[in-house]
Image (cartoon, rainbow, N blue to C red):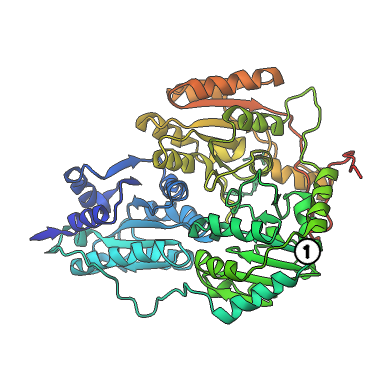
Amino acid sequence: MKMTGAQIICESLVKEGVEVIFGLPGGAVIPLYDALPQYPQLRHVLVRHEQGAAHAADGYARATGEVGVCFATSGPGATNLVTGIANACLDSIPVVAITGQVASPFIGKDAFQEVDTTGITLPITKHNYLVLDVGSLARVIKEAFHLARTGRPGPVLIDVPRDVFIDRAEFCYPSEVNLPGYKPTLKGHPPQIKKAAKLLNEAQRPLIIAGRGVTISRAYAELRELAETAQIPVVTTLLGIGCFPGSHRLSFGWLGMHGMAYANMAVDAADAIIAVGMRFDDRATAKVSAFAPHAKVVHIDIDPAEIGKNVRVDVPIVGDVTLVLKELNKLISPAEHTDWVRQLDAWRKERPSTIKDSQGLLPQFAIRQIYEVTQGEAVVVTGVGQHQMWTAQHYCCDRPNSLISSGGLGAMGFGLPAAIGAKIGRPNSTVWCVDGDGSFQMTIQELATIAQERVAVKIAIINNGYLGMVRQWQELFYERRYVATPLSGPDFVKIAEAYGLPALRVKHKEEVVPAIKQAVEEEGPFLIDFVVEPEENVYPMVPPGAALSEVMEAPGKEVAT
Ligand SMILES: Cc1ncc(C[n+]2csc(CCOP(=O)(O)OP(=O)(O)O)c2C)c(N)n1
């Protein structure tokens, strides 16, 4: 039977198991939207800005492990998606974005709302398509989903001219993809795995660095087996948080600029490092030439382009983390590494992640109480800045995908829409958005999406009246010249109420727990504006350009020895 391009897209999305689409219509995509009512199994969530659609699709993908989908119109709709697509690209998140384009006879004529969407998104997508023939739509969608979710996941964009939505073709959804140039290596090379096992079996001070690749590959059991068999301590990257239980005896926090001092010290002292599904981002390694100076490095990654890109690697293994670890575990000898684990325990005791006593309301205290009240069971989504780092430090995650945060791009504005996506993907989980007052104001309009779609997200604004992380750098490295960082905002409680959401303001420590409890008990969404100490800094901190071993602790913080 012949179908329109719009129907073919919807049929194909249903075949791919899509349940939710985040988007906002416009002229070029009206024919696509017009087909949606024929497919009640596809829920469309109307956002207020397309950046929100891309971030919500990203949050949905992270929370569920499925592909997130977003729609936008041509021109400004497509350009508004760009930040969200770049964010998904840098963090390897499977997203399929479908954009309308001007009708094909108008392409290249600077037509109304025409931009070169595939040109603009080429460097920030895993792949993109401009579909000029309705007959190829089904194949393209099949390929797009395959590319987005296999190998190293990432965003794929499909640009569809208006006439292609309307043209008709026979619909036949392909059962297979045929992409001769795309065959991700899944099985690791056996001699390399043998070399890695030998290196780890002979090491005195081995360390695992686990990244998001563990979560993508769902290699939780294999990672745990490796750690427990040979008693190898585990540190994670920021995006790896939760892929190994944070409360496990062998878990030593996360590394990098604001990671735990003991995690960074472990990297500095290790004699063998096995980096699993991580990419040695500069926020994680700090000064690359001083990274892990005593260690031989094994690197497992599905993307060969990551091997040796930033850090010298002794044993590279290209492959899927689960499959590689399964083979590696067969060759790992049981070991104790008692002295090494004891050393790490001692460093953790010397430099614990405690919160100082204060009369005032500290941001870390508010975040810690969210952890206590939710007993670590919530999915927490953050904005970008100090509050993001405090959340990663003080909300201990035992489960994967329970901390959702913009890592590679560090995109302020991610929090609220990503939390919407996460809550829609995981309706039975409590989802908290811990946001900064600056980050929140970048996508504040998505409060209307929450209200219209009745998304029960709990929002905690860590309101310090500054673009806090930038202010911190100005304080520490620019002699306190606070240029363009003092930040006013609206009355967030009134704003929430104007959108129809209940809200509270909290200024004192003793109000924190009752407010969080009230938010949790409320069935729907709830917003708390935590007015916190304005000039609190994030510590520990590895100053820009310094090595991981050069960790700055909070001034006056005693290091117990
Ligand atoms: C879109 C975007 N613009 C600018 C920045 C640079 N930046 C990083 S953190 C930060 C401050 C964030 O302020 P806020 O959201 O209030 O969080 P806080 O640091 O105060 O917790 C800024 C401006 C960014 N990361 N993203």
Does residue 484 appear in the picture of this structure? Answer: no
- Choose top left, top right, bottom left or bottom right for residue 198: bottom right
Q: Quadrant of ligand 1?
A: top right
Identity of the residue furthest to the right in this view: 561
Question: Which of 30/197 is in front?
Answer: 197
Provide residue 316's location: percent of width, then percent of height. 62, 76
Amino acid type at image mark 1? Arg
Answer above or below: position of 23 versus 100. above
Provide residue 157's location: percent of width, then percent of height. 37, 61
Please indicate whether residue 233 sits to the left or right of residue 152 in the image: right
Report the residue at 58% width, 71% height from top. Answer: 306
Q: Secondary structure at mark 1?
A: loop
Please indicate whether residue 202 sits to the left or right of residue 371 in the image: right
Report the residue at 61% width, 45% height from top. Answer: 384
Does residue 16 appear in the picture of this structure? Answer: yes
- Total numbered badges shown on the rendered structure: 1
Report the residue at 78% width, 54% height from top. Answer: 341
Report the residue at 59% width, 48% height from top. Answer: 242
